[in-house]
C-alpha cells in the first residue's frame, strides 16, 4: 500500500491514517475536488468504487465516504469528508467520474447530502414526493397514529 | 422550406416500463425517440426499493444474511459470501478449510446460474424463444444442487459468519460431477441457437458499444468491463477467500458491444466450471463452521469488502459501533452502477437496440433498488 | 368451369334449382365452408404452434384441457369470447372498432381463389393471383388503422413498422410470383395447378420459392419478421389496446393469413392439389401443413431481425434477386421455345 502521508503536506487540512483494511484520508469538503483529482492523476486511483455516507448525529456530522480503487492494480483508498449535519453539502464529482452521478443521487436521496454541480440532483430510489432521508438516524420508522401503514 | 415546415416531425417520449417485458423487473426507461431512433434515455428506478440498508441497522449481523439473498436474487450465494466475508474481516474470523471450499463451489455455481439467466433472457429479448430453454434447463440443475445443500432454491442463506450453514449431503458431489459433465453440451446448444446465429449477431454486434475509458469512468465492472478488453477480475487481482489457489483464466473481449457482453458470459461459465472442478478435487474433510460467539459483536470500526459478483464488483461497507447490530451497512451493487451507463450506451440506437443493450448489461432490479 | 367443373356447382345442378339460386347457394356453401375451414384451422393451428414450439424447446406444451390438451384452444377462445370488450376512452373510436373487422374480411376473401382440390374453388377468377395479392395488401391498412386509432405510442410504432415492412415486402413477393406466372402464362390459380402436373414449380423456380417464402414470412408478420408485434420492444404493437373478441379477430386473421399464404405457396410451387393415390383435397391439406410447419420451424428458430436490417434485406437483396430471377426465367423460356418449337 502506498504512503499517502505526502498528501498532508500538499493539501493543508488533509489527514491520513492507516485504517483496519485500507488507508483512510480525511479531507475537508472544500478541498475534495482537488484531492480527488490529485489521487486520480498521481496515485492512479482512477475508479470510483463506492460513494456513501454515514450519519453521526451524536457528533452533529454526516460523513461522506468515498472508496477509490486503482484499476487494474486493485489498491484501494477510503476518502472521508465530514459535513455539517444541519446543511450537508459537498462538491459533485460527476466531472471526474460520471459513475458518481447515480451514487450521488442515491446519497442525496437517502442521506440528504447536497452535491454542488451535480447535473440532475433528484431522488433516485424513493418517490419524488417522499419526505425525509431514510438513512439518517433520526428518520421516523413508525407511522403516525391512525395513518395508513 | 415550406414543405419541410409542413412536414415538421416531433420527438416522442416513450415510457418503457415499469411494466414491460424487456425491463427485467420493475424499472422504467424514459426513451426519447426520433422515429425508431433513441435520442435520449432517462432511468427511473426505485420501484423495488425496500430500504435494505436501513433494515440492516435494526437487525443483528446474522439476521441480515437472508436479506442479502434478496439483493441479486439470481446469485444469492455471491451476496451471502460478500456479506459474511465483510463481517469476518471486521472480526478477524478464520473460516475452516472445508467451508472455504464449499463457499467457492457454491459461489461459482451461483455465478453460472446468474450468467445462464442473462444468456437466456438476452436471447429471449431478441425474440430467440428457443434459446431461452437450454440455459434455464441447466440452471434448474444448479438450483437442484442448492436445494440439496441448503433446502431452498432461490433465497439460499447458505453462508454463515464463520463458515456455511451445513455440510453438503453425500449425494451432492456425484450430482455436481454429473452437472459439470453435461455443462459443455448445454453451452454448445446455446452457441448453436444464439451465438452463432446470423440474425442474433446482426442484432448484437456493434450495438450498445462502450469503450474502455468510458466504461471505467461510468464505474462499469464485472463481465461488462471485461467485454471492453480489460482483464479486471477481483478473484485474480485481489483474491479473497481461497481464490488464489485455483487456476483459471480471466476471459476478455475487445469490442465492448452487446455481442461481446453476451459471449463473455459463456466464456466465464466455462472458467467457473473449471474452478468448481478444482475445488471439488481438493475439497478437504473437516468442520464447516468456525467457533464464533453466539452473539456477533464486532469491535468498533469500519471495513470495506469487495467480491467479484456475477454482475460486477459487489461491495459491502460495514460500520460497527461495537453493538450486535451494524451501525451502518452500505451495499455497493454492480447493477445499480452499470445501469447508470445505460443512457450512454443506448443513445443513438433503435428501440430494438436499446432492448438488446439493456439485456446485455444484465441488471437485477432487486440489486438496483435494494 | 375449367378443369372438370366446380364440384359444388355440379352437385347443386342435380337438384334442378334455377341458375340464380344455384350460384347463390354455391356462394353461401363456399363462404360457410371457408369460414369453417378458417376457424377449425386456426383453433388447431394455435394448438399446433404451441405444441411444435414446445417440442422444439423440450417442453410438453398444453396438456391439461382435454386429452393431450386438445381442447386448450377451445378453452382460450371461449375465454376471449367471455371477456369484457374494453374500448379505452382515449382511442379514435370508430376506426378502433372497425379495424379488427377490416383485417378479418380480407383474410376470408383470400380463400376465394384457392383451389382446395380438384374442382374445389369458390371463384375461379382469371386474375386469381392478382386478386390474392390485391386483397392481401389491404391488411396493411387495417393494421395501420388499429395502431393509429389506439392513440398509444407503442401501437403507433407498431403501425409504422407494419407499413414500412409490408409495403416493401410486397414487391419481392409479387416479383417472385411473376416467375411462375411467366411459366404458365396465366394468372388463373387453377391453370397454375394444372401446369404442375408433371413437375412442381419449386424445381423450376427454386429461387422464386425462397424469395416467396421470406417475403411471405414478412407479409404475415411471423418471426423472424414479427416486428409489427415486437413483443419484447413494443409489446404487441397495434394490438396493445385491444381486448376480448376484437383482439381475437386480429389473432384469428393472423393465423388465417398464415394458412392462406401457405395455400398460395402450395398452389404456386408445390403442385397444388396434384398427387397420386390420395384424394386431391387430402394432398392439398398435407402440402399445406408442410408449408405451415416450415413457417413454424423458422419462427421458433430465429431471433427477430432489426428494422433497418429488415428493410436492407428487402431492398438490397431480395428485390434485385427477384429481378434477376425474372430475367433468367425470361431468357430460359425463350431458349426453351427456340429448342422445342411447337410446345408453347
Image (cartoon, grey):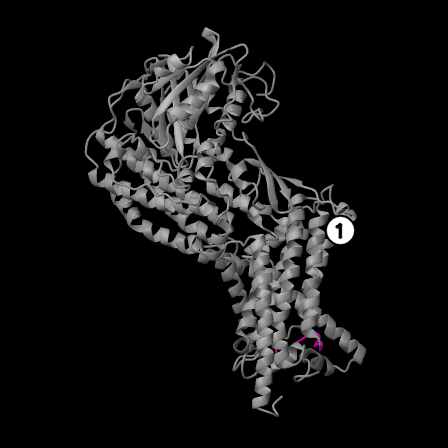
| Residue located farthest toward the bottom when viewing the structure as drawn | C342
Q: Is residue B105 left or right of residue B321?
A: left
The magenta stretch is C117-126
Q: Quick one: A2 or A21, which is closer to the camera?
A: A2
Label 1 sits on a secondary structure element that is helix
| Residue located farthest toward the front when viewing the structure as drawn | A10
Q: Position of residue A71 (x, y in %)?
A: 37, 31
Number of dots carrying numbers: 1
Q: Is residue C123 magenta?
A: yes
Q: For residue B296, which quarter of the picture?
A: top left
Q: Quick one: C313 or B359, which is closer to the camera?
A: C313
Vertical position of residue C112 compared to residue A103: above or below? below
Q: Is residue B125 magenta?
A: no
Vertical position of residue A124 compared to residue C161: above or below? above
Q: Is residue B235 left or right of residue B49?
A: left
Q: Position of residue B315 (x, y in %)?
A: 39, 27
Dot 1 falls on which chain?
Answer: C
Report whether residue C196 is seen.
no
Q: For residue A37, which quarter of the picture?
A: top left
Vertical position of residue C210 compared to residue B321: above or below? below
Q: For residue C109, which quarter of the picture?
A: bottom right
Q: Position of residue C195 (x, y in %)?
A: 60, 82
Report whether residue B35 is seen.
yes
Q: Which residue is mark 1?
A: C95
Q: Position of residue A50 (x, y in %)?
A: 43, 25
Q: Is residue B229 left or right of residue B341?
A: left
Q: Quick one: B93 or C10, which is closer to the camera?
A: B93
Q: Please report the residue visible at 52 percent of the width from the left and 30 percent of the height from the top.
A: B48
Give the prevailing secondary structure in the magenta stretch. loop
| Residue located farthest toward the top when viewing the structure as drawn | A59
Amino acid at each position: 500500500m502506498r504512503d499517502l502521508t505526502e498528501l498532508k503536506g500538499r493539501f493543508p487540512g488533509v489527514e491520513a491514517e492507516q485504517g483496519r483494511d485500507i488507508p483512510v484520508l480525511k479531507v475537508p469538503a472544500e478541498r475534495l475536488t482537488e484531492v480527488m483529482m490529485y489521487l486520480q492523476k498521481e496515485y492512479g486511483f482512477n475508479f470510483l468504487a463506492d460513494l456513501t455516507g454515514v450519519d453521526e448525529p451524536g457528533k452533529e456530522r454526516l460523513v461522506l465516504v468515498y472508496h477509490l480503487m486503482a484499476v487494474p492494480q486493485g489498491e484501494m483508498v477510503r476518502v472521508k469528508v465530514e459535513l455539517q449535519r444541519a446543511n450537508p453539502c459537498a462538491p459533485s464529482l460527476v466531472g471526474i467520474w460520471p459513475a458518481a452521478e447515480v451514487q450521488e443521487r442515491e446519497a442525496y436521496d437517502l442521506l440528504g447530502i447536497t452535491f454542488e454541480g451535480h447535473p440532475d440532483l433528484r431522488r433516485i430510489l424513493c418517490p419524488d414526493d417522499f419526505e425525509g432521508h431514510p438513512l439518517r438516524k433520526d428518520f421516523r420508522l413508525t407511522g403516525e397514529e391512525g395513518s395508513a401503514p | 422550406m415550406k414543405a419541410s415546415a409542413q412536414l415538421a416531425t416531433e420527438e416522442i417520449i416513450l415510457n418503457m416500463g415499469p411494466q414491460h417485458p424487456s425491463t427485467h423487473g420493475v424499472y422504467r426507461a424514459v426513451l426519447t425517440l426520433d422515429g425508431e431512433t433513441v435520442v435520449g434515455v432517462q432511468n427511473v428506478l426505485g420501484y423495488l426499493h425496500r430500504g435494505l440498508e436501513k433494515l440492516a441497522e435494526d437487525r443483528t449481523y446474522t439476521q441480515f444474511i437472508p436479506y442479502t439473498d434478496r439483493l441479486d436474487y439470481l446469485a444469492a450465494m455471491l451476496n451471502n459470501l460478500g456479506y459474511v466475508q465483510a463481517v469476518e474481516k471486521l472480526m478477524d474470523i478464520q473460516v475452516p478449510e472445508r467451508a472455504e471450499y464449499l463457499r467457492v463451489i457454491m459461489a461459482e455455481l451461483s455465478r453460472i446460474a446468474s450468467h445462464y439467466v442473462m444468456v437466456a433472457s438476452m436471447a429471449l429479448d431478441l425474440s430467440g424463444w428457443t434459446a431461452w430453454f437450454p440455459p434455464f434447463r441447466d440452471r434448474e440443475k444448479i438450483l437442484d444442487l442448492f436445494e440439496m445443500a441448503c433446502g431452498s432454491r432461490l433465497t439460499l442463506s447458505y453462508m454463515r459468519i464463520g463458515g456455511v450453514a451445513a455440510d453438503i449431503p453425500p449425494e451432492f458431489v456425484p450430482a455436481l460431477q454429473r452437472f459439470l459433465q453435461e455443462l459443455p453440451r448445454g453451452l454448445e446448444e446455446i452457441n448453436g441457437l444464439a451465438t452463432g446465429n446470423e440474425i442474433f449477431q446482426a442484432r448484437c454486434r456493434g450495438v450498445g458499444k462502450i469503450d474502455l475509458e468510458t466504461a471505467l469512468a461510468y464505474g462499469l465492472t464485472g463481465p461488462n468491463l471485461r467485454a471492453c478488453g480489460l482483464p479486471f477480475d477481483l478473484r485474480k487481482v485481489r483474491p479473497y477467500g481461497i481464490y488464489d489457489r485455483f487456476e483459471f483464466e480471466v476471459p476478455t473481449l475487445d469490442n465492448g458491444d452487446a455481442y461481446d457482453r453476451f459471449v463473455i458470459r459463456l466464456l466465464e461459465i466455462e472458467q467457473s466450471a473449471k474452478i468448481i472442478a478444482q475445488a471439488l478435487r481438493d475439497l478437504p474433510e473437516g468442520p464447516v463452521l468456525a467457533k464464533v460467539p453466539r452473539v456477533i459483536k464486532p469491535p468498533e470500526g469500519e471495513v470495506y469488502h469487495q467480491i467479484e459478483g456475477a454482475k460486477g464488483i459487489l461491495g459491502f461497507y460495514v460500520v460497527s459501533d461495537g453493538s450486535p447490530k451494524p451501525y451502518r451497512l452500505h451495499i455497493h451493487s454492480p447493477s445499480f452502477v452499470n445501469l447508470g451507463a445505460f443512457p450512454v450506451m443506448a443513445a443513438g440506437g433503435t428501440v430494438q437496440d436499446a432492448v438488446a443493450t439493456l439485456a446485455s448489461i444484465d441488471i437485477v432490479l432487486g440489486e438496483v433498488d435494494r | 368451369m375449367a378443369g372438370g367443373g366446380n364440384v359444388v356447382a355440379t352437385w347443386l345442378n342435380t337438384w334442378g334449382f334455377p341458375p340464380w339460386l344455384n350460384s347463390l347457394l354455391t356462394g353461401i356453401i363456399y363462404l360457410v365452408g371457408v369460414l369453417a375451414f378458417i376457424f377449425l384451422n386456426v383453433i388447431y393451428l394455435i394448438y399446433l404452434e404451441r405444441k411444435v414450439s414446445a417440442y422444439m424447446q423440450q417442453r410438453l406444451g398444453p396438456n391439461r384441457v382435454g386429452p393431450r390438451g386438445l381442447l386448450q384452444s377451445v378453452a382460450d377462445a371461449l375465454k376471449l369470447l367471455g371477456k369484457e370488450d374494453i374500448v379505452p376512452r382515449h382511442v379514435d373510436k370508430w376506426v378502433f372498432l372497425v379495424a379488427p373487422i377490416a383485417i378479418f374480411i380480407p383474410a376470408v376473401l383470400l380463400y376465394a381463389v384457392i383451389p382446395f382440390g380438384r374442382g374445389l374453388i369458390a371463384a375461379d377468377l382469371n386474375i386469381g393471383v392478382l386478386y390474392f395479392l390485391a386483397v392481401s395488401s389491404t391488411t396493411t391498412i387495417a393494421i395501420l388503422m388499429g395502431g393509429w386509432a389506439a392513440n398509444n405510442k407503442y401501437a403507433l410504432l407498431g403501425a409504422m413498422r407494419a407499413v414500412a415492412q409490408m409495403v416493401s415486402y410486397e414487391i419481392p413477393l409479387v416479383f417472385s410470383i411473376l416467375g411462375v406466372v411467366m411459366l404458365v402464362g396465366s394468372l388463373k390459380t387453377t391453370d397454375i395447378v394444372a401446369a404442375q402436373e408433371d413437375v412442381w414449380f419449386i424445381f423450376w423456380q427454386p429461387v422464386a420459392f425462397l424469395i416467396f417464402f421470406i417475403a411471405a414470412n414478412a407479409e404475415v408478420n411471423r418471426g423472424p419478421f414479427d416486428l409489427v408485434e415486437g413483443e419484447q420492444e413494443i409489446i404487441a404493437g397495434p394490438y396493445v389496446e385491444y381486448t376480448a373478441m376484437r383482439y381475437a379477430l386480429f389473432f384469428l386473421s393472423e393465423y388465417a393469413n398464415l394458412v392462406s399464404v401457405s395455400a398460395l405457396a402450395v398452389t404456386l410451387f408445390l403442385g397444388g392439389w396434384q398427387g397420386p393415390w390420395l384424394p386431391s383435397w387430402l394432398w392439398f391439406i398435407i402440402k399445406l401443413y408442410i408449408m405451415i410447419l416450415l413457417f413454424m420451424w423458422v419462427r421458433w428458430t430465429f431471433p427477430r431481425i432489426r428494422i433497418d436490417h429488415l428493410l436492407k434485406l428487402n431492398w438490397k437483396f431480395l428485390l434485385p434477386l427477384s429481378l434477376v430471377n425474372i430475367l433468367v426465367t425470361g431468357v430460359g423460356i425463350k431458349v426453351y421455345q427456340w429448342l422445342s418449337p411447337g410446345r408453347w
